[in-house]
């Protein structure tokens, strides 16, 4: 049995965007999407990823991103995970909506999945989940 985590992160985060009055939704130097907004110098997405990477039961992590962000994030991911984490992290092209991003990741995961595998889906911009909560969800999924 494997525990696979899907983190949809292809969204634009428009509800969080800071658009100055009078720009009609367009901004030349738009702020980063909320998953790339930094907390303490680190993107929120990296904080979220680290929470799942720290849980021993998690086997692999799939992150769904916009295609144009994959190369840049891969470089950031490589430097952010140089702390020795051995978790397999895969990047997949997400969709315009969360549902499409999850579907894209599920389709990629399905190629190597087994019937007893557990798949967790967690929003990229919810970095304050604890290892204890993650483990409780895994335990409940195994039980039920």
Image (spheres, helix red, strand yellow):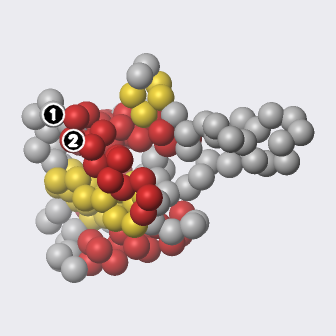
Using the rendered image of the protein, determine whether residue 12 is visible from the camera's viewpoint: yes
Rendered image quadrant of residue 93: bottom left
Under circle 2, the secondary element is helix
**Label 2: few (<14), some (14–19) or many (≥20) C-alpha neighbours in 10 Å:** few
- Whether residue 52 is visible to the viewer of this picture, yes or no, is no
Residue nearest the viewer, comparing 31 with 13: 31
Say which element carries label 1: loop
Check contact, mark 2 vs mark 1: CB within 8 A: yes
Task: Please state the horizontal and vertical placement of residue 28, each as a whole percent of the image.
Answer: 68, 41
Tell me which residue sits at (25%, 34%) in the image: 80
Q: What residue is pinned by disc 2? A: 78
When the figure is inspected, residue 49 is found, relative to residue 66, above or below; the finding is above
Q: Residue at x 48, y 39 (%)?
A: 36
The residue located at (40%, 73%) in the rendering is 104
Q: Is residue 63 left or right of residue 80?
A: right
Picture coordinates of residue 43, whole percent (x, y): 42, 34
Q: In the picture shown, does residue 42 fall above or below 89?
A: above
Identify residue for label 1. Answer: 82
- Disc 1 crowd, CA 10 A, few/some/many (<14, 14-19, 20+): few
């Amino acid at each position: 049995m494997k525990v696979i985590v899907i983190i949809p992160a292809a969204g634009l985060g428009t509800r969080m965007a800071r658009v100055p009055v009078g720009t009609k939704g367009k901004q030349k130097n738009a702020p980063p999407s909320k998953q790339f907004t930094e907390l303490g110098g680190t993107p929120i997405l990296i904080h979220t990823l680290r929470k799942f990477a720290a849980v021993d039961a998690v086997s692999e992590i799939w992150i769904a991103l916009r295609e144009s962000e994959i190369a840049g994030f891969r470089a950031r991911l490589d430097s952010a995970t140089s702390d020795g984490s051995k978790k397999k992290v895969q990047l997949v092209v997400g969709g315009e909506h969360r549902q499409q991003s999850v579907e894209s990741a599920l389709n990629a995961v399905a190629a190597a999945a087994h019937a007893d595998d557990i798949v967790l889906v967690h929003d990229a911009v919810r970095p304050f989940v604890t290892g204890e909560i993650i483990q409780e969800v895994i335990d409940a999924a195994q039980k039920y």
